[in-house]
Image (spheres, helix red, strand yellow):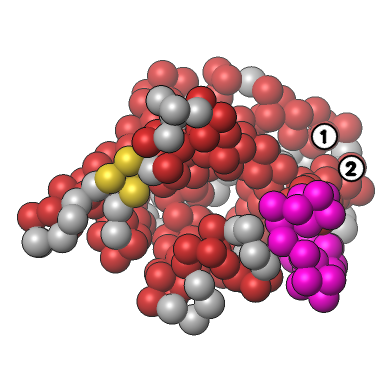
Amino acid sequence: MYLAVAVGGTWVFWLAAIALGVRFDSAVGLVLLLVGLAVPGVAGIAFVYLVYDERGRSDFWNRVVDPRRVGFRWLVVILMVPLGIAVLAGVADLLLGGIGPAWGEGVTGFGLNPLAILPALFFATLPPILEELGWRGYALDRLQLTWSALSASLILGVVWALWHLPLFFIGGTHQHDVVGFATTSFWLFMTGTVALSVAITWVYNNTERSILGIIVLHGWVNFTAETIVVPDPAYYGLWFVLAAAIVVIWGAKTMTNATEVPHPPLPTDG
């Protein structure tokens, strides 16, 4: 139910932008973008209060604000993995005869106009917060009550990828202006989102289900992708490699050293 509400609710606003022919860099378009972005998180909070008792609700907010769940070791993982993938993808492309890594527009334009970094900062902050309160804050727990960590990751990853679909038809978005619909980069983006979902579940399950940790991870993935530009095949290829390595090393059931998938306390029916 939650996944349908999250995707359908967002699409109402983003399809409205398509119908109105507005860009997301216009005033009306920006409002529709932000409201659509907020739906997964708002719906996630609403479902937490509908489905869980007081203990489960307290657990949710603790996972949002408590950094101790992450710990130093996994903070290093969160910061180094996206950066390492971006750098390695650039080096791999260079060794294969490509152009290698390049700085994004926010970095190259920062010296002349410090505001040029704002898009990168936006994608590193607000979208991860608005999305992850729902995707991992609510949906992943519910999926893992029934499915293995890998299966839950793949299900959520496919839904998460499809959630982005309207963005490919709206001007002023990276998906429309840079990636394009039904291009090679489009398919890499969609399937790469699923691979990223596996990596996110791995971090989530190993940080005591920390929503805060996942917000930081999601934001850092966005920021590194905005500031270190590398060819899509090398970049997404490494996310596939990481996802496969996680499953091989940690196992598909929990992606941790534990035998049981972490789950929220005392969920009620619903």
Residue 18 on image: x %, y %: 76, 72
Where is the N terminus found, in terms of image quarters? Answer: bottom right
Question: In the drawing, does residue 59 fall left or right of residue 242?
Answer: right
Judging from the image, what secondary structure is the residue with disc 2 in? helix
Q: Identify which residue is drawn at 24% across, 42% down.
A: 87
Q: Identify which residue is drawn at 57% across, 40% down.
A: 119
Magenta stretch: give its range: 3-31
Q: Quadrant of residue 95?
A: bottom left
Residue 125 on image: x %, y %: 61, 34
Where is the C terminus found, in terms of image quarters? Answer: bottom right
Q: Identify which residue is drawn at 75% across, 53% down.
A: 26
Q: Is residue 247 visible?
A: no
Residue 190 on image: x %, y %: 49, 69
Q: Are marks 2 and 1 in contact (CB under 8 Å)?
A: yes
Judging from the image, what secondary structure is the residue with disc 1 in? helix
Q: Which residue is mark 2?
A: 49
Q: Quadrant of residue 65?
A: top right
Amino acid on which the number 2 mark rests in the picture? Tyr
Q: Which residue is mark 1?
A: 57
The question of residue 128 being in magenta is answered with: no
Residue 162 badge: none
Question: In the drawing, does residue 248 fall left or right of residue 146?
Answer: left
Question: In the drawing, does residue 232 fall left or right of residue 152?
Answer: left
Amino acid on which the number 1 mark rests in the picture? Arg
Residue 33 on image: x %, y %: 75, 54
